[in-house]
Structure formats: C-alpha cells, structure tokens
Amino acid sequence: MSYSSEEILETIDMVEKLHFDIRTVTLGISLLGCSDPSASSAARKIYERITNAGERLVSTVRKLEKTYGIPIVNTRVAVTPIALLDHDYSPDDYLELAAALERAAQTLEIDFLGGFSALVPKGFTRGDLNLMAALPEVLASTEKICGSLNVASTKAGINMDAVNRAAHLICRAAALTADRNGIACAKLVIFANAPEDNPFMAGAFHGIGEAETVINIGISGPGVVRATVERCPGYDLGSLAEEIKKTVFKITRAGELIGRKVSKALGVPFGIVDLSLAPTPAPGDSVANILEAMGLECCGAHGTTAALALLNDAVKKGGAMASSSVGGLSGSFIPVSEDAGMIAAVERGALSLPKLEAMTAVCSVGLDMIAIPGDTPPAIIAGLIADEMAIGVINNKTTAVRLIPAPGKKVGDKVAFGGLLGEAPVMAVNPYAPDCFVGRGGRIPAPLQALTN
C-alpha cells in the first residue's frame, strides 16, 4: 500500500483535531491445540500458548503508534470459544481455565482478553452449561476477561432456553459486583449471528474458521465523520452520504496500514479491518453528535433511525472502497454509556429503550452498555434479549445485548464505570411482564430467509 503526502497530512490533522484513533489491535489465537482431559494441564497449555503467541504484541503496537503518530487505544487478545475445549469440565474447572486466561492477559499487559464464550444458538453441550454456570463468577473475579454467548442465528433460530439462562447470568453477574455498579455485566455480550473475526470487546472471540493466529484492527473516528457532516450544511442527503464515504475511505486506509504493519512485524497473518465508528465519552467523539449534525435537534427525535441507516450504509461503502479486508461488525456503535451525545439524549428524554431497539435494526450491534434498574426481573431482561435477537435473525445481521442491571439503582440515577466504559443514566424498562412468553422456552424456529442452500 502506498500513501500520498496529502493523505498523510490529512491523517495527522484527523489525529490532532478530530479524535481519530485506532480503537484496538486484537491478536486472535487458536487454543484448539490446548484441549486436554485434565483442566490443570489445559490451563497450563493455554497460558503458554497465549504468552508465547503474544509476547511481542504490546511492544510492537507501542512502537508503531510512536512511528506513525496514530493513537492506538487498546491492545487485546481474542481466543477460541473456551466451551469448545471441553472435556467434561466442571464449573470449577472452567474457573481454573479463566484464571489461566487472566494470568496470561496480565503477563502480556494487554487491556482485555475475549473468548470465555459458548456458541449455543441451537442447543447446549454439557460443557456449554458448565461454562455458563461459571461465567458470572469468572467475570466478577477477573479484570481483563470478557465473555459472550451466541444464542441465535438466522440459520438456527433463537434458543429461548439460552436466552432465559443468559438473563439469569446477567442478574447474577450484577449481584456479584454490586459494589462496582454491576460492572461484570459490561464484560458480557449476548449475540445473534456473532462474527468470528470481531476485534471489539466484550464480544470478541477467535472463530474456528480462522488461522492459528491473526491480527484484526478496529478503527474509530466519530469525530472525523462529525466534522465532515458539519462542513456540508447545504448538502442533500445523497450528497452528504458521498462525503461520509470519502472520509471513511481515508480512515480505513490508515487503519489497514497499521494492521498490516503489526502483522508484518509479528509474522502473523493480517485478518480484517473493522470499520465500526466506536464512540468514547470524550466531547466530540460521539455517534449521536453525527446524527445531530445531520439536522436532528436531538438524537432520538423522529428521523433518527433513518439518519443512522444513512450513516451506517455510507460507512460500509466507504470502507469497502478502501479495503478488500473489511470484516467484523463494521458500521456504527450506539453504546449509551460510552457516547456523551447518547447520554445527553437520554437525560433530555429524547432517547428511550424502544427507540434504541429501533435503531439497532440499522446499526452494527444492538442494545449496548445500557444501565437498567437493579431490580429488573430476569424475565424482562430475557424479553429484551429476545427482541434484539429477533431483529438479528430476521434481518440476517449481527445484533447483541449488553445490559447492566445496576444494583440498588433506579430510573434517573447514574452509574459510573470509568475509562472507555464511561457512565450511564439508568433507563426505564417496560414494566409489563413477558414471563409466560419467555417461560415457554424451546426454540423460535429459523425464518424462511434461512433456506438459502
């Protein structure tokens, strides 16, 4: 890849003035070779495999950050979904594996490690159930470990038994970290159609179709896109979409450059660049502010879903023009706690859970980093998850839920998590019970769209 002097100067300007950064460099590592009938032996193999594969990851990233002057916010590792290593492990065995993962993450000095996960869209193995039983304690007792459950897919439908279990796991994880506002839930994502090459936490894992090791990049850049929109006050929406595409083209080029340089330095294959606009709590680094710059008085106003659809489509098209290695989620994130504009919209009463659910039909993920009252019953949480899974399954897209029932908090309170996780106003949920519906369990069948063979 060659870059013109104009491109280099534009990138410097984006970094210095518009909050552009590489949100994450994520090293994917296969752990399939670490499977062992003895959990202790498997834990030892896991630790050695991760620390050997990732030994130079952080130093390489820091060197390239300094060389190119582009901030790289997080360095992460994603591993094979741990439930796939099962040898009839007990919940205590999974706790031992999690401890090995945490030690490896601490040794490498990475920010997060994803993959304490199970893939259960159609049913459970005994290992899946035992990993899920251990999951709340794992998330509560570790600092860097993230977990996910894929409970639905367009091909399989929605595993409502898994949805119900997930709701109880979320409540348990919140209770175990009640002294920290339920922060363990911030490290747990419930997916439909989870991608195997997603570099973003908390949902990253290293899919079984991936190479032994791979480098994936997650870019950011809401501030850059917002500035583009603000420069186009008289443009019609089609012309505005073209300008956004051109900007995302530049962002993607910079992201792929860093990814390929890390890949070459480590001798690891380059995987994908994830185009997702990932906001932060910093002023000006907000997806909500992009939508408002398009002409909405406040994010959440009527027209917000259409504006987000335009943004998401332009992001994907601009990235696809720039790179043949686009993957992961690639679009626009709308996490409430991590986006200052979203927080402000909730506090103004413009943005509610129903509106966020509608927006997830056209964005990258779903109901993300949303604090709800701590006494929300598991059945209501299961209903929220099921609705989001249905959007993903019917539309053949990735959707996800990251809910935090904040212990002891009620609507209108605010909970702080720190760092990129930000702070979240506690949002109201619909109080009417879905107990009888979600309690039926079983599996919502795959839609007609699944019959594509």
Image (cartoon, rainbow, N blue to C red):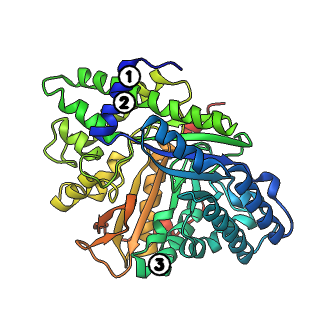
Instruction: Give the structural element (helix, strand or loop) at label 3.
Output: loop
The percent coordinates of residue 128 (x first, y second) are 69, 64
Disc number placed over residue 413 in the picture, else none:
none
- Dot 3 corresponds to which residue? 177
Three-letter code, disc 3:
Thr
In whole angstroms, how far apart are the C-alphas of marks 2 and 3?
41 Å
| Residue 268 vertical placement versus 367 (above, below) | above
Disc number placed over residue 7 in the picture, else none:
1
Circle 1 packing at 10 Å, graded few (<14), some (14-19), many (20+), is: some
The disc, 1 or 3, on the residue closer to the chain's N-terminal end is 1
The residue that appears at 59% across and 58% down in the rendered structure is 113
Instruction: Give the structural element (helix, strand or loop) at label 1.
Output: helix
Three-letter code, disc 1:
Glu
Instruction: Give the structural element (helix, strand or loop) at label 2.
Output: helix
- Dot 2 corresponds to which residue? 11
The percent coordinates of residue 422 (x first, y second) are 34, 62
The residue that appears at 28% across and 67% down in the rendered structure is 428
Which residue occupies the foreground of this view, 287 or 86?
287
Q: Quadrant of the C terminus?
A: top right
| Residue 282 vertical placement versus 225 (above, below) | below
